Image: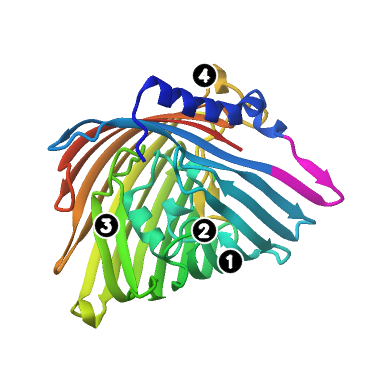
Amino acid sequence: MACWLHTGCLASLSVAIVAVAAPVASLHAQSVPVVRLHGVTIRPYATDQLDTGGFVSAGPAHPGTGARGARLRNGVRVNIHDQVEIGAIWDFGPAPNGPMRLFEGQVSYTGLKHFVFTAGIFKPSFGLESMQAQGDTVFVERSSISTITRNLATGIERQAVQAEAYGRRYHLALSATAGTAGPGEDGNQRAMAFRLVGLPVRSHDMVVHAGISGEWVFRPASMTHSPPAIALSDNPELNTGTVSKYLNTGRLAATSAGAFGAEAAIAWKRLLFQGEGYDILLDTSPTAGSQNLNFHGWYGMLAYTINGTPRQWKGRTAAFSSPTCARGQDVLCNGYGVLEVAARYSEVNLDSATVHGGSQQTGSLGLNWWPTAIIRTTVQYEYGQENGGRVPEHFHAVMSLFQIKF
């Protein structure tokens, strides 16, 4: 349900976010309470976001602006003797009227050096932008092609098992996945996914990242009395509850589907460039005419850390963290906090044969500010064009984000 931008709506959402943030905002990141008992470490987890904004102008439609608690993820992560990790996190958003559900319920064995074995409900490794934690992404939302591909068989809240091997210059992950947690229509889906990443260059000033990812849905989900089907869709890289999924193929009767793509990044001093491109292949069932459909998309992004320590590559996720203050300084880095500017361009095409899911081109500019290590604010401008699919055909949008993350 849409939450329109008026005083009462914003007040209720702001109170919800502040209620979560109040006991934390006055703390430094390192002083968030951690419980340690006989080799067991219990760390609280939170990623709470308030999104405000929407279309400033659009044609031919004008969906308006709104606000919502886009993500209200809270819980704990437990480490037992550096051998076992447990995650128990619930997503209370999007608020209001969102489908609250278990975000993470997983167990990982980490006792074998350079290896991790995980089972439960979590986010399997797939793609560079997808593997950045939501609170670490450069923009408010991921690029559409990243969202569409990961939602095919990986992404958040996914029932899966996974084996990983990683080090300072490599990351390899293999996973078998099913449906997502909670009520849904994909519980009987079955798929496989992999990701392989290497760092041909890793020095003090430069990191060069290259990788490939793939996924194959060999048993698409089927509802009762309905044939197996797959739907590809996304919002226009922003979502305050006021916009529809203009990119939308609808449900396609399918026998199998897959995605394959490449990822690359260069981090040089304070500058980060990253990009990805994917092809999506879908085989429709004989009842739908036995078509071989091919969809595709890509994005390229630049981010520059003006003040603070720039984004760092993490072997466990093979992705880049948020910029940070220097060690020992958590509030107002150099007097005014951590600042980052960024630009992104992306394209997606969901038109193939007789399927017209629309094509989209978007350009975004963003400014991120971390006054403390656990608080982030973002202002983002986006221009987009939609061809086919649903209206609007073009739009200007402004988004803001307030985030508590630890």
Q: Earlier in the sequence, mark 3 or mark 1?
A: 1
Q: CA distance from mark 4 to mark 3?
A: 38 Å
Q: Residues within 10 Å of mark 2 (few under 14, many from 20)?
A: some
Whole-angstrom CA distance, mark 3 to mark 1, is 27 Å
Please provide the residue range marked out in magenta.
33-43
Residue at point 29%, 66% (across, down): 280
Q: Would you call the spot at circle 1 few (<14 residues within 10 Å), some (14-19), or many (20 or more)?
A: many
Which residue carries the number 1 mark? Answer: 164
Q: Secondary structure at mark 2?
A: loop
Helix, strand or loop for disc 1: strand
Magenta residues, dominant SS class: strand
What is the C-alpha distance between the residues marked 2 and 3? 29 Å
Residue 61 sits in which quadrant? top left
Q: Is residue 265 left or right of residue 255?
A: right
* 1 or 2: tag closer to the N-terminus: 1
Q: Earlier in the sequence, mark 2 or mark 3?
A: 2
Foreground label between 2 and 3: 2
| Between discs 1 and 4, the one toward the N terminus | 1
Q: Amino acid at mark 1?
A: Glu
What is the quadrant of residue 22 in the picture? top right
200 over 8 or under it: above or below: below
- Determine which residue is flagged by label 3: 297
Can residue 380 be seen from the camera position used here?
no
Residue 227 in sight: yes
Residue nearest the observer in this picture, 281 or 95: 95
Residue carrying label 4: 336
